[in-house]
Image (cartoon, rainbow, N blue to C red):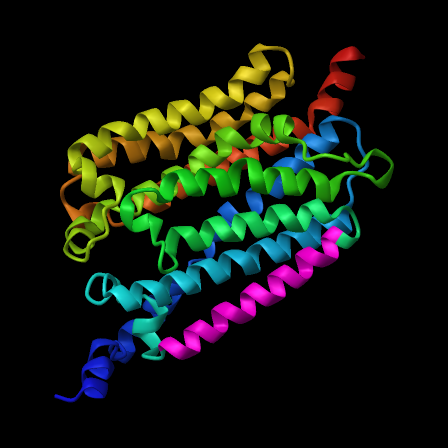
């Protein structure tokens, strides 16, 4: 068989009756909760401080963040196709579905350019620091997946994920939403760390859980994810610590009197977290049983982050109500 035939057979389209489900999985629309969370948290924090919320900046940032995560997802499919890690274990890879690595790469480039253009507009309406921070996030994303680095293949994807979706993205969002009259002249690292650290740990849990069902494929292709390093048993034992750490980082400012009690609303994410812990605790070594574990982690991340953002946002009204 010639090389073109080998490539074509490797990425041959799935049977027609399965393509709809595979395309739905490939789009990964629930995953975009991780992209929009930093700016939603920044919006909740801004409202809690009595600042005027810039809705135009919020909407532009949301759209740009979605496009940039689309770039990362598309580029990840392209780069993983190059290493072969998705050849058998990921039929919903867009490269596998379309059979066109070049086309998916162009989609990725388009999403990146459009997302950065929108972020440049956000920065022009606030401060250039916004674009600088977003470029840093993109750089971390490339370090995770792109050649020659591929740090995700060395087990370093989770720290990069926390940095990108935690202090970097949260600081950019805080700057983007700040009123012109109160725009910081330096990067607000301390508020970004306080606000973004816990939710970013929940986002990192989503990435961590995505490895469990593909340990054998990852190991066979040299992708040394944390789950490959630790084994599924020990890795599953870390999941409760991810959840506890995320909540502890959110509760600490409340206990210190820096945030209102309503910030504890992030606990609405606990039910899917408990389901996730039970699932991986019982079936961590059964890929067919835990293939959906990352979506339980994503549900925890989304509910927890939305609860925190809403809890911060309603604080002024709660205080006014109690004061009556």
Toward the viewer: 121 or 288? Answer: 121
Residue 46 in picture, x, y percent from top left? 72, 33
Residue 24 in picture, x, y percent from top left? 39, 65
Q: Quadrant of the N terminus?
A: bottom left
Residue 299 visible somewhere in the drawing: no
- Compared across the picture, whether 104 is left or right of 129 comes to left
Residue furthest out toward the front: 148
Q: Quadrant of the C terminus?
A: top right
Name above or below for residue 109 compared with residue 181. below
- Compared across the picture, whether 248 is left or right of 18 comes to right
Residue 192 in picture, x, y percent from top left? 61, 31
Q: Which residues are magenta?
A: 101-123
Name above or below for residue 112 compared with residue 272. below
Looking at the image, which residue is at 24% across and 83% down? Answer: 8
- Compared across the picture, whether 264 is left or right of 293 comes to right
Residue 142 picture quarter: bottom left
């Amino acid at each position: 068989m010639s090389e073109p035939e080998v490539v074509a057979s490797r990425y041959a389209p799935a049977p027609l009756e399965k393509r709809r489900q595979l395309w739905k999985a490939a789009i990964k629309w629930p995953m975009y909760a991780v992209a929009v969370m930093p700016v939603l948290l920044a919006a909740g924090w801004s409202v809690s401080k009595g600042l005027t919320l810039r809705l135009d900046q919020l909407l532009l940032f949301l759209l740009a963040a979605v496009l940039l995560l689309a770039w990362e997802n598309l580029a990840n499919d392209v780069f993983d196709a190059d290493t072969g890690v998705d050849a058998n274990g990921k039929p919903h890879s867009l490269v596998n579905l379309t059979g066109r690595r070049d086309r998916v790469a162009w989609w990725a480039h388009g999403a990146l350019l459009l997302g950065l253009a929108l972020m440049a507009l956000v920065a022009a309406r606030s401060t250039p620091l916004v674009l600088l921070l977003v470029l840093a996030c993109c750089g971390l994303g490339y370090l995770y997946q792109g050649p020659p680095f591929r740090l995700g293949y060395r087990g370093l994807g989770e720290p990069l994920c926390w940095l990108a979706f935690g202090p970097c993205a949260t600081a950019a969002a805080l700057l983007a939403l700040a009123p012109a009259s109160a725009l910081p002249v330096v990067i607000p690292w301390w508020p970004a760390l306080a606000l973004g650290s816990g939710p970013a740990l929940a986002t990192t849990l989503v990435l961590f859980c995505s490895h469990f069902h593909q340990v054998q494929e990852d190991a066979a292709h040299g992708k040394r994810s944390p789950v490959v390093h630790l084994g599924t048993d020990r890795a599953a034992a870390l999941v409760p610590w991810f959840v506890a750490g995320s909540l502890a980082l959110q509760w600490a400012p409340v206990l210190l009197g820096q945030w209102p009690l309503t910030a504890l609303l992030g606990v609405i994410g606990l039910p899917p977290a408990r389901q996730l812990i039970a699932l991986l605790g019982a079936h961590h070594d059964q890929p067919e049983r835990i293939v959906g574990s990352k979506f339980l982690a994503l549900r925890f991340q989304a509910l927890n982050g939305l609860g925190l953002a809403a809890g911060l946002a309603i604080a002024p009204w709660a205080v006014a109500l109690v004061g009556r």
